[in-house]
Image: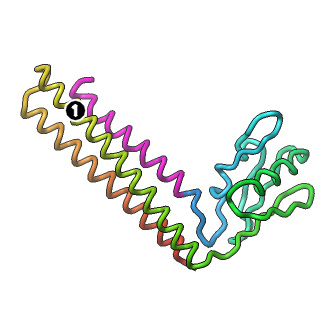
Amino acid sequence: MNAQSLIPDLKDRMEKAVDVLKRNLGGIRTGRANPGLVDSLRVDVYGSPTPIKQIATVGVPEPTQILIKPFDPSVIKDIEKAIVSSDLGFAPQSDGRVIRINIPALSTDVRKKMVARIKELAEETKVSLRNIRRDSNKVADQLEKDKLVSEDIKTDLKNGVQELLKKFEDQVADLAKQREKDVMED
């Protein structure tokens, strides 16, 4: 790795860490229905676990309901079974063509647990970002040791790494704060 590719590589890795957080936060329940609640669901069809998005459309016709319409109606029982056996705690209702999932209101205790989970996910992401910073700083140190950059350039690189870390940590905090707010709303 060279000095010119250090910062763009760092930024790319940090963006990926934040994208993982966004996906994880999307799967956390709020009081409203959200297709992201069933995104992680895998259904055993055609001999292999398949993501639900590949075998059905998932929509939200009402704020408290998720509607799943399989492309192939013969897999509706498999989808129901996957929902029931998941740890989502939903009771699917089927009419033979579509599956409706009514989203119950969240209790205060459940909301507090969700907020704790959000904080946990945010902290895991921040740790990941700091590990990326550490790796980048090691590369900058090695570049100086190998006499590929001067000490001033190494210092500039480390300052750029720190600025990026701060930017992404702020982004993580904002995402977590917004999701906490969504969870605590009625």
22 w.r.t. 101: above or below? above
Residue at left 47%, top 47%? 19
Q: Quadrant of residue 136?
A: top left
In which quadrant is the N terminus drawn? top left
Residue at left 35%, top 52%? 126
Q: Secondary structure at mark 1?
A: helix
Specify whether residue 19 is painted magenta.
yes
Amino acid at pointer 1: Lys
Q: Is residue 91 left or right of residue 122?
A: right
103 w.r.t. 86: above or below? below
Q: Quadrant of residue 68?
A: bottom right
Specify whether residue 44 is painted magenta.
no
In the image, the segment drawn in magenta is 1-25
Residue at left 83%, top 45%? 71
Q: How is the image coloured?
A: rainbow
In which quadrant is the C terminus drawn? bottom right
39 w.r.t. 145: above or below? below
Q: Is residue 159 left or right of residue 51?
A: left
Q: Position of residue 137 (x, y in %)?
A: 21, 36
Count of marks placed on residues: 1
Q: Residues within 10 Å of mark 1 (few under 14, many from 20)?
A: few
Q: Position of residue 165 (x, y in %)?
A: 28, 48
